[in-house]
Amino acid sequence: MATSAGSRNSSQGLKERRPTWASPFRSQKRNCYTRGSPVRGTHPSVSPIQIKGEVFHPGNSVRWLGYWFTPALDPAAHFSRRLALAQGALALIRRLSPPGAGLPPYLCHRLATSLIARILVYGADLFTPSVGTTTRLDTFWRKVQRWTTNCISATPTGILSVESCLPPVSLLVAHRQRLAALRVVCSPPSVNPATARVHPSIPSLSVYLAPDSSRAITKDLLSVYLPLHWKTPRPVPSMRNHLPVDAVAHRTITFTHGLSRMPMSNSHLVCPTPTLPPKSLMDSTNSTLTKRVREKLLAEWASLFPTPRYYLHPPALFPRPFMGLGKFVAGRIHQMRAGKCYLAAHPTWRFPDADTSCPRCGLEPETFEHAILSCPSRQHSRSRLLHGVTDVSPEAPLWSSLPLLKRFATFIGVPSTGFPPTMFPPSTPPSSPPFSLSPQRVPPPVFRVFSLAEV
């Protein structure tokens, strides 16, 4: 009781000595958060505090630089908020490119990678989403892929990601974690303090690495602390306790083979010494490592997310040349390449037993190759517009030549190849197909004036 009375007297004295200019707590600072030490057996306090007669309850999470932390360090709280922000961003920018109109897929891809993806996987260098959270993120990410390509809902998810040039979320998270590990390992300790805490076994150009006896502040807290050597395989499941920075640096093993020393990024911020290699050599080595990280992403994409056997196009991270066409024509090309479009040989799950013969000639199934290269009813348009296009396979020069793509886009529009049957009958071409490399312009609607007698 005496201690409590003394504390009250001290608090009253502090309150009386408070300067007149001191402002009360603002609403942004009312999210109080207290933490304990799980290692020492204590838990976060859940007791409220009272200031000037107002009670403040501790929050369940705290935000710092866009990261949301919870007492259990659960990444679900962080990625749930990132998902909500990404959904709001997509709701705004999808108005720029509705289905069949607006921005071409090339610009949609730029918006998806530079805006939505950065919002969605922000914080992935620190947090790894759980399986359930990854499923939710992937469900939203497929909406972005479908908006980019204008593909229909029956398109397989593996083909959808390859056509949109947007990797799945799990690969994006792993890619960002590798890049973050590369930054930690290659940064100078004077620029990134975390680099000075990496294990001394890492072949770094810096000599300012903390020894293992003093690099771990948590060594006194963890009674079973063991350092993780750089080239020591991590046991699965993990049976040792090591610093998180050891696990981060361990991700660089798969793409740093053949290097005697790690290059130093931001070397212009460090005083030059005779032991440092030339800046041009370190910059080229950094570019090589970044390229290896990108190649590993493509290799995992092809192995972990295979496409059906009939789809042979390889995954890519950059937009394809035909994605610069108008949204309507580029969407038709995406659908025909994916094998899920309005051609008769591309049935959906709703009509699995539909007739696959070509409705124009009736000689063969209406596949992508038949509609473009060999359909007799399209021979006149083919000889007049499709000069130089003899193959539509993934290795064909059609997909890398801009003049051939322009002819191909014009040929698709004249006989209405791959168009919805209810939109344009097969015998009549559309009135004004948009086949240019600029965003599509929708023609103004035509209004009919009725007379009073007709009304």
Image (cartoon, grey):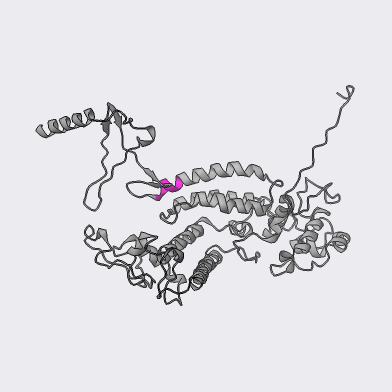
Locate residue 401, reporting x and y percent: 74, 65
Prevailing secondary structure class for the magenta stretch in the rendered image? helix
341 over 61 or under it: above or below = below
Residue range corresponding to the magenta coloring:
75-80
Q: Is residue 76 magenta?
A: yes
Q: In this view of the protein, can residue 153 be seen by the observer? A: no
Q: Quadrant of the N terminus?
A: top left
Seen at 27% across and 67% down, the residue is 212
Locate residue 121, reporting x and y percent: 49, 52
Locate residue 184, reporting x and y percent: 41, 63
Q: Is residue 348 magenta?
A: no
Nearest the eye: 71 or 364: 71
Q: In this view of the protein, can residue 91 be seen by the observer? A: yes
Nearest the eye: 243 or 20: 20
In this rendering, position of residue 120 left or right of residue 237? right
Seen at 43% across and 57% down, the residue is 125
94 over 163 or under it: above or below = above
Q: Quadrant of the C terminus?
A: top right
In this rendering, position of residue 357 left or right of residue 180? right
Residue 180 found in image quarter: bottom left
